């Protein structure tokens, strides 16, 4: 079983940057795809980005492409978020899946989430 812990959320002004981290306890990410999802109030959880740990292949939602960067560093998966917009405000979750998937249903393990708030 993989336990995931997110960190790095907070409050930032529009145009600013935040860096989220996802760490695994008890196990490593070596056989997984690690994805970031977000969920705003009264909206469905949506795919943000994912990285295949084995070879570093990355995937992005169109809404964040060019602004967000997912990377693997040591035993963590980071999400660098630049040029943040108020519509990026949500709870951000990292999750682990055996294969790349943009659907949250394909992910077996989830972190507790971290709040990102972008003020206008």
Image (cartoon, helix red, strand yellow):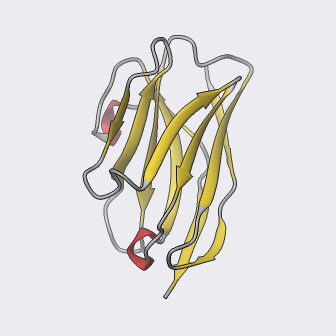
Which part of the image, by quadrant, shows the N terminus? top right
Residue at 44% across, 78% down: 86
- Please name whichever residue, 71 or 116, is drawn nearer the observer in this view of the structure: 71
- Of all residues, the one furthest to the right in this rendering is 26
Question: In terms of image quadrants, where is residue 75?
Answer: top right
Relative to residue 42, is residue 29 drawn left or right? right
- Please name whichever residue, 112 or 83, is drawn nearer the observer in this view of the structure: 83
What is the count of numbered marks? 0
Question: In terms of image quadrants, where is residue 100?
Answer: top left
Q: Give the x, y percent position of residue 20.
A: 62, 50
Relative to residue 42, is residue 119 drawn left or right? right
Q: Is residue 92 above or below residue 110?
A: below
Residue at 41% across, 56% down: 67
Q: Is residue 13 above or below residue 26?
A: below
Residue at 53% across, 77% down: 118
Residue at 51% across, 79% down: 14
Question: In terms of image quadrants, where is residue 9?
Answer: bottom right
- Of all residues, the one furthest to the bottom in this rendering is 120
- Please name whichever residue, 44 or 116, is drawn nearer the observer in this view of the structure: 116
Q: Give the x, y percent position of residue 3.
A: 65, 30
């Amino acid at each position: 079983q993989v336990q995931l812990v997110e960190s790095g959320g907070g409050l930032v002004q529009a145009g600013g940057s935040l860096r989220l981290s996802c760490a695994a306890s008890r196990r490593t990410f070596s056989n997984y795809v690690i994805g970031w999802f977000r969920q705003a109030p009264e909206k469905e959880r949506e795919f943000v980005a994912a990285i295949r740990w084995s070879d570093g292949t990355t995937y992005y939602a169109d809404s964040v492409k060019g602004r967000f960067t997912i990377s693997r560093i040591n035993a963590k998966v980071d999400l660098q978020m630049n040029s943040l917009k108020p519509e990026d405000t949500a709870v951000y979750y990292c999750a682990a899946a055996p294969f790349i998937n943009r659907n949250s249903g394909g992910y077996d393990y989830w972190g507790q989430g971290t709040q990102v708030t972008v003020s206008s």
